[in-house]
Image: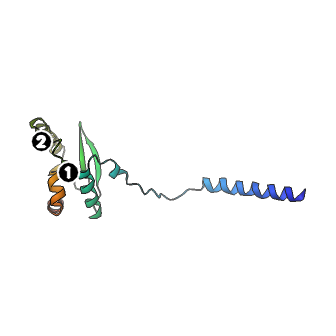
Amino acid sequence: MVSYVVFFGLILVGIVFFVLDLRRPRPQTDLIDRERLKCESPIERRLYDTLRIQGYYVKTQVPCGKYRIDLALPTYKIAIECDGRAYHSTPKQRAHDRRKDAYLRKNGWRVLRFSGRMIYQDLSAVIERIEEEVNG
């Protein structure tokens, strides 16, 4: 009989410590890059990853009025648009892009546009251009 009481007592103590451990505050260990998950295309992800490696704080899909900025460096108020051929080659889409750029500039953003081809084939020139804008 005593062995049963000891056995169940130990189980009860274990449960109490388990529950207390669950209630203990834990440090933030969120390893998921939520901003990267919001990138809408491979060219956005490629540029986002490169900018993060360079040490920049980058936000993605930043709302600005009725528009969204693909990638933003909010510290410098720089809006970066990544233009894929499929979505930015028609006259109607180019007119939309001009209106968007004008709206962003009117709201204090410096706008940079890069084609998917440039991001894939000459990423160093893209980064160089962004750094020029950051520094000057």
Splitting the image into 4 quarters, where does residue 26 fall? bottom right
Query: Regarding mark 2 in the picture, which secondary structure is present there?
Result: loop
On the image, the x and y values in percent for residue 80 come to 20, 51
Task: Indicate which disc, 2 or 1, sits on the residue closer to the N terminus.
Answer: 1
Q: Residue at x 45, y 56 (%)?
A: 30
On the image, the x and y values in percent for residue 19 come to 66, 53
Q: Where residue 89 is drawn, which disc sits there?
A: 2
Q: Residue at x 11, y 35 (%)?
A: 92
Classify the position of the N terminus by image quarter: bottom right
Judging from the image, the colouring scheme is rainbow
On the image, the x and y values in percent for residue 5 come to 85, 56
Q: Amino acid at mark 1?
A: Ile
Which residue lies most toward the right here? 1
Left or right, residue 53 beside residue 83 = right
Q: Is residue 72 visible?
A: no
In depth, the one of 77 and 124 nearer the eye is 124
**Dot 1 crowding, Cα within 10 Å, few <14, some 14–19, many 20+:** many
On the image, the x and y values in percent for residue 24 come to 59, 56
In depth, the one of 88 and 60 nearer the eye is 88
Q: Residue at x 28, y 55 (%)?
A: 58
Q: Closer to the camera: disc 2 or disc 1?
A: 2
Left or right, residue 63 beside residue 97 = right
Which residue lies most toward the left here? 91
Classify the position of the C terminus by image quarter: bottom left
Query: Regarding mark 1 in the picture, which secondary structure is present there?
Result: strand
Q: Where residue 80 is drawn, which disc sits there?
A: 1
Q: Amino acid at mark 2?
A: Ser
Q: Is residue 15 above or below residue 66?
A: below
Give the Cα distance between marks 2 and 1: 18 Å
